[in-house]
Image (spheres, helix red, strand yellow):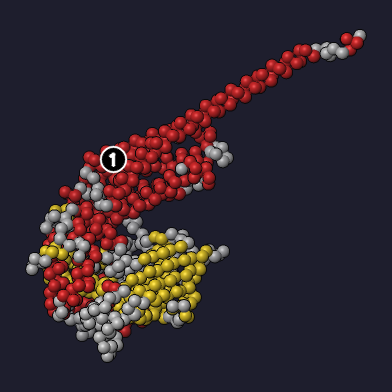
Amino acid sequence: MAGAGGGQPAGGTGSSRRRGRWARWLVGGLAVAFAVIVGLAGWVAVRGLMARSQLDEARTRIATLQRQVLAGDIPAEGELRAQVAGIAERARAARLLTGDPVWSAFGRLPWAGCPLRSAAELVRAVDTMSDAGLPAVADLGGDLSPDRLRHQMTINVSALAAARVPAQRAAAALSALSVAAEGTETCGWPGRVSGVDDARAEVIDRGRTLSGALDSVALAARIGPDMLGASERRRYLLVVQNPAESRATGGIIGGFGLLTADRGHLSLEGISGNGSLPGGPTQKTPATALPGPFAARYGSFWPDRVWANANLTPDYPTVGKLYSHLYQAGTGIDADGTISVDPTMLSYLLAASRPAVLPDGQVVTAANLVDLVESKVYARIPTVAARDRFFAQVGQAVYAAVESGSADTMKLLSAMSRAAGEGRLSLSSNHADEQDVLSTTTLGGALPAQSGPFLAVVTQNATASKLDYWLRRRTSYRVQRLPNGAGAVTIAVQLTNVAPEGLPEYVRNREDIRGSGGNPQAQNNLWLSVYTGRDSLFAGAHLDGQPVGLTSGVEDGLPVVSTYLTVDRGQTRTLELKVLEPQAGPALAVRPQPLPVPERLDVEGVPVTSPWSRRVKN
């Protein structure tokens, strides 16, 4: 009995066996499931590595294409089509690798799946762009081939016009790529570790940059043929500015000529120094009526009569109109527009062609041109008339160097693009439809019409000296975002006079002060203006740490504060402004002023962008 009482209950042995079998089945099932999951994860990992390899290769090829387009060095048609086909092939392969059901299933995981989802979206965006936009880029190879586009001083206006549609189509596809990439998820730590976030940022940047470059091509193709005389001869007043005596768009007019465009052929005549300005440096009567708000700010300087003051405003469309009216009043010629350049821009052209040779055999190179015409000439040539002839000779020699045919077309285009971005090449048209397009571009140089944070620092010579060659400028812009989205902004402008001893009296001139004794200490006097965004509020200023009052005004809807400021030799002066911008972002639009030595700009708290949109609309 005792033995029977101590045994298993009836049926106990069978239940134990069944539980053992269920346990083995469960463990086995879990092991199989785990193996499947591991296998599928491995499948996703391998395909991910393969997709990344394909996408990296596509990105590398897109980067190469970007460098070529930005440099104006568009390959020949066959080479370009091969590049485009290679990008499309790799984008398609990456999309296939990231588009299967297993990848999609793992992408639904709440945390680790984010990089998979983001990567798949990026790959789809690149593949879509490859199908929609890159074939149009390939079409540009034939139209914009250097051999077809330019021969010496003649531009093939038919080839330029043919580039418009493919450039617009490609630009739209690349812009859509940026928008799609911006819409993909940012994945925090997993995105950073996997590299997906870096890839996302790169795709956005590539799309924006290439789209902008192709927009410029589309713009040139839209208005370029007519401006180059495709339908009728065009004449443009060419102005060479001298930043040694600064103005808002660069410097006073130092020389000029008349550029004629006839069915794409360019010719330049009447190159002269400013001693031969039509109607004289100051015309007897106003060449045009000044609008009321403009006259209130600039009227006392006679920009409608004084050639040297026509570009006191940073708004180049206005400057172009004033130059055109002054030229018409002095010559009777109605120019179709104006082109402004400076010696730095001319040095870029020499770098893209060959050195200029003066009548006496003197060689002017890209390296010595700026220093020669903005500084050394005043010590070497003592009289105004002789300097005037010298400036004309330099202009003629630079034109001859470019005209010679030794210049590489794409290097010339790159040089002009760089100059336009720095504000050293500006263009206006007296044909309203063309000017409307130009005003939206860097080349047109208009003050911006859109809202948002904006900064333009302008220094202008107030002494009729040439001391601005020795001016050094540094500006810092710091913004603190407020809870309501506005921005508390601090702007600090530092001006330093590095003029050496022994400068000629003409360079040290102080026409604003009688009996200055030749200004032996080379003291400079500047009219300093700071423009900020629409509806921004000026909240106070300090000069060298002490409170100071400034003159406030508005130009084309933009608030501007101004003051006159003397800067002694070796001195640095600092003007600090407090401004409240109604919006702290999303970016700060900065309008550059072309100076002999570029300004140093430091911006904190907001990215920097151009104030001009280059999107070309139908």
At 44% across and 78% down in the image, what residue appears? Answer: 543
Crowdedness of circle 1 by 10 Å Cα count: few (<14), some, many (20+)?
some
Q: Quadrant of residue 460?
A: bottom left
Image location (x, y in percent) of residue 500: 27, 76
At 20% across and 85% down in the image, what residue appears? Answer: 284
The quadrant in which the N terminus is found is top right
At 76% across and 15% down in the image, what residue appears? Answer: 15
Residue that extends furthest to the right in the rendered view of this protein: 1
Front residue (pair 315, 547): 547
Q: Quadrant of residue 419?
A: bottom left
Would residue 526 appear left or right of 113 to someone viewing this image? Answer: left
Q: Quadrant of residue 617?
A: bottom left
Name the amino acid type tagged 1: Gln
Q: In the picture shown, does residue 570 fall above or below 355? A: below
Q: Which residue is mark 1?
A: 83
Can residue 499 be seen? yes
Front residue (pair 290, 349): 349
Q: In the picture shown, does residue 281 fall above or below 596? A: below
What element does badge 1 sit on?
Answer: helix
At 43% across and 80% down in the image, what residue appears? Answer: 550
